[in-house]
Image: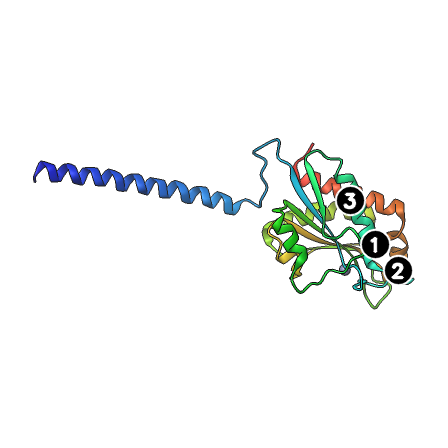
Amino acid sequence: MNKRVYNRIRFFGCILLLILLILIWYNRKHDNNVQDDNRDFSTTDKVFTVVIDPGHGGKDVGAKGASGLYEKDFTLSLSKKVKEILEKEEKIEVYMTREEDTFISTVDKYRPKFANELDADLFISIHGNTYEDPNVSGTEAYYYHDKFKSFAETIYNKVVSSTGFKARGVKNKDLFVVRYTDMPSVLLEIGYLTNPQEEQMMFKDEFQSSLAESICDGVKEYLEIE
Ligand SMILES: [Zn+2]
C-alpha cells in the first residue's frame, strides 16, 4: 500500500475514534441528567425556588366545609404561613401562584406553567378535602410522576404527624397540577372540610402555624438544608 494512503487512513481512523469517544461521553452525561430528579446539591450556594399553590380562589371556592367555610380561604391562609416561614431561609426563594382571593382558570394550566416558567425546584399545592359522608376524615397526598414520589412522601409524613388526622396515604393520581409540573410536586389534601372536627381544626390559627412549620420541615429535609 502507498505510504501516503496509509497515513491518510490512519489519520481519519484517529478522528473517527475521537468522535466516538466524545459521543460515548456525551451520552453518559445525558443519562445522568435524566436519572436525576432535579435535585442539584453540587453547589452549596444554590438558592432553591419553591412554589406554593393555594388551591382554588375567587369564584372557585373549592370545598364547602361542614359549617360553610370555604376551602379557598383555608388554602390561602395556610399557604401564606408556609411562605412566611420558608422566606426566612437564605437558600430558599418562595413564590405563590396567587397571593389574594383571585380566580385562576384551569383551562390554560396556569398553576404548573407558573412553576415551570420560574424553573422552580419544588411545587406544593395545598387543598382541603370534601366528601358527602361527614364521618370521612384524614390527610392524603398526591403525586403523578414516579420519580417524584419520594418528595410527596417526605412532605406527607411531616404533615400527617402535624395534623394528627387519619393517615390516608400517598397516592398516584392524574391531577393536572402534579402532572404538568416539571419539578418534584405534591398536592396535599390536609383534611376533610366536610368533617366538622377537621374543619374546625383546619381554620384554627395555631393549627395552621404548626402545619406550615411541618411543611417547611419537609421542604428542608428534601433539599438537605441544615
Ligand atoms: Zn381543592
> Going by the image, does 194 lie left or right of 106?
right
- The CA distance from mark 2 to mark 1 is 8 Å
Where residue 127 appears, as percent x and y from the top left, is: 77, 56
- The CA distance from mark 3 to mark 1 is 12 Å
Where residue 183 appears, as percent x and y from the top left, is: 61, 49
Q: Is residue 170 above or below residue 206?
A: below
Give the residue displayed 78% in from the left and 48% down from the top: 79
Quadrant location of the N terminus in the rendered image: top left
Q: Which residue is mark 3?
A: 82
Identify which amino acid the numbered label 3 is placed on.
Answer: Val
> Going by the image, does 128 lie left or right of 171?
right
Give the residue displayed 62% in from the left and 54% down from the top: 181
Q: Which of the numbered marks, if any, corresponds to residue 69?
A: 2
158, 123: nearer the viewer: 123
Q: Earlier in the sequence, mark 2 or mark 3?
A: 2
Q: Which residue is mark 1?
A: 74
Quadrant location of the C terminus in the rendered image: top right
